[in-house]
Image (cartoon, rainbow, N blue to C red):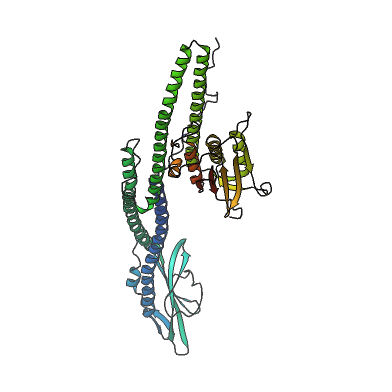
């Protein structure tokens, strides 16, 4: 006994990888969260800038007020500068516990009148009748400086003094941080509320999909009627396509059920007759009678074989009609193949004449269609003519020509023709004439009609003058410039 090796981790076992499921809810939430994060970051930067600007504006006003107050207290007495220091104005600037205030008052020639001599000078010297502001560093700390010039007319000329007031950034940084923190809390609360509202709105927006899911889950396997649940406008096309798919599936299932029922009905009788004739042939002792019984069995077997072939051909046409894999096909080649497959090769051969256009080799007669379906239709058309329209002194004519821009296939025979009352009923399934000349199932013309209709063509039957039938199939020609 040969033992198979046990599978191991390195034996290259087949693994089935299920496709990753896509969640619309998670995608939308992820996109909303990303947008909110980006928006929150942008708003944070805006709030931080606003907080810094607000703090600077507030304390800059105090710096300007202090400079103006010191300028008003500065006087020129006997050509000497005197100042009564307004300490209250400087005290307003000391809001933070570690905040420090510096000042410097100097003459136009940089002689110190009062204050800190090493306080950084203004970046640009020039007339400044109103307080101006700039940033600098003093004693290793960043400071905000306000300055202005005070001009007083003296006995000989106008005297100028420069007043500077500097403040560390402790207070304004604290105010800016407080504004930023409060603004950030507000933004976070707003973002949380917006995300909760977005999640609720998203669940509510996706509820129609859940209603459709519940409706479909509650249906039986055979229930393929359109969806009744109300859907939003965005899902209308999807639901319409789903309804169309279920409608096509329902039609296919109905066709399949009808085909199975008809096949069972059509096959039951020939099989029963074949079985009975076989029993009779087995019971016959006379060789001549046994031969006659076997010939009857052979005829019924041929009839049954033809019935099965036509049922399979009908099923194949129905299946391919739903697929509609159309392409350019050559009618001359299809007709030649149909004649070769249909006309028996044994002697005596029927007189079948195929007439093709003289330009068929250079300019192929093409239509857009399914070559298998068209070949089955032509084979049934020729077979019907051979079975019901052939005569000892006549022939079967198959002609392909151009008519009004379309291709026309005409199959003419010399049989008895068709009664006018059956001209339309002949296209129905399992319908045969009142006096059929050969056994058949009555499916040939229905197969031809179905194929012609699928290819947007026309099929007509007309009796010929002098006897016989013309079966004419007209198909739209393939426009190469379309």
Quadrant showing the N terminus = top right
**How far across and how far down the image is residue 340, in percent?**
62, 35
Left or right: 48 as drawn, with respect to 337: left
Q: Which image quarter: residue 227?
A: top left
Q: Which residue is outermost to the bottom?
A: 155
Residue 114 visible in the current orientation: no
Left or right: 96 as drawn, with respect to 448: left
Left or right: 31 as drawn, with respect to 339: left
**How far across and how far down the image is residue 197, in percent?**
31, 52
The mark tally for this picture is 0
Q: Nearer the viewer, residue 438 or 93?
A: 438
Q: Nearer the viewer, residue 251 or 455?
A: 455
Q: Is residue 248 above or below residue 440?
A: below
Residue 386 visible in the current orientation: yes
Q: Nearer the viewer, residue 84 or 208?
A: 208
**How far across and how far down the image is residue 201, in percent?**
32, 51
Q: Is residue 403 above or below residue 47?
A: above
Q: Is residue 73 above or below residue 391?
A: below
């Amino acid at each position: 006994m040969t033992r198979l090796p046990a599978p191991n981790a390195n034996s290259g076992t087949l693994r089935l990888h299920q496709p990753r499921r896509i969640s619309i809810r998670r995608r939308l939430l992820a996109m909303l969260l990303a947008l909110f994060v980006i928006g929150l970051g942008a708003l944070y930067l805006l709030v931080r800038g606003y907080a810094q600007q607000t703090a600077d504006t507030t304390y800059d006003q105090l710096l300007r007020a202090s400079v103006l107050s010191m300028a008003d207290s500065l006087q020129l007495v006997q050509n000497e500068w005197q100042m009564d220091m307004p300490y209250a104005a400087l005290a307003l600037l000391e809001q933070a516990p570690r905040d420090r205030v510096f000042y410097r008052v100097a003459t136009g020639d940089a002689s110190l009148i009062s204050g800190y001599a090493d306080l950084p000078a203004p970046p640009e010297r020039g007339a400044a009748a109103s307080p101006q502001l700039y940033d600098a560093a003093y004693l290793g700390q960043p400071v905000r400086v306000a300055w202005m010039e005070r001009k007083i007319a003296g006995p000989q000329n106008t005297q100028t003094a420069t007043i500077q007031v500097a403040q560390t950034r402790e207070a304004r940084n604290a105010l800016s941080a407080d504004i930023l923190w409060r603004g950030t809390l507000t933004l976070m609360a707003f973002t949380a509320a917006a995300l909760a509202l977005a999640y609720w709105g998203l669940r509510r927006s996706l509820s129609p999909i859940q209603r459709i899911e519940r409706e479909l889950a509650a249906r039986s396997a055979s229930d393929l009627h359109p969806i009744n649940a109300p859907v939003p406008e965005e899902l209308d096309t999807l639901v319409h396509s789903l309804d169309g798919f279920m409608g096509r599936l329902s039609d296919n299932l109905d066709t399949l059920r009808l085909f199975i029922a008809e096949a069972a009905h059509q096959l039951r009788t020939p099989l029963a007759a074949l079985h009975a004739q076989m029993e009779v042939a087995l019971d016959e002792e006379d060789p001549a009678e046994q031969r006659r019984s076997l010939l009857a069995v052979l005829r019924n077997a041929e009839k049954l074989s033809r019935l099965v072939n036509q049922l399979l051909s009908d099923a194949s046409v129905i299946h391919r009609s739903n697929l509609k894999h159309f392409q350019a096909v050559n009618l001359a080649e299809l007709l030649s193949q149909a004649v070769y497959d249909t006309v028996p090769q044994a002697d005596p051969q029927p007189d079948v004449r195929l007439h093709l256009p003289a330009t068929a080799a250079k300019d192929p007669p093409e239509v857009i269609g399914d070559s298998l379906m068209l070949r089955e239709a032509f084979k049934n058309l020729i077979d019907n003519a051979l079975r019901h329209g052939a005569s000892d002194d006549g022939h079967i004519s198959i002609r392909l020509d151009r008519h009004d821009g379309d291709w026309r296939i005409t199959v003419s025979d010399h049989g008895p023709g068709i009664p006018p009352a059956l001209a339309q009923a002949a296209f129905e399934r399992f319908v045969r004439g009142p006096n059929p000349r050969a056994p058949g199932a009555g499916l040939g013309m229905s197969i031809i009609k179905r194929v012609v209709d699928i290819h947007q063509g026309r099929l007509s039957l007309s009796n010929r003058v002098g006897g016989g039938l013309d079966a004419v199939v007209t198909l739209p020609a393939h426009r190469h410039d379309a």
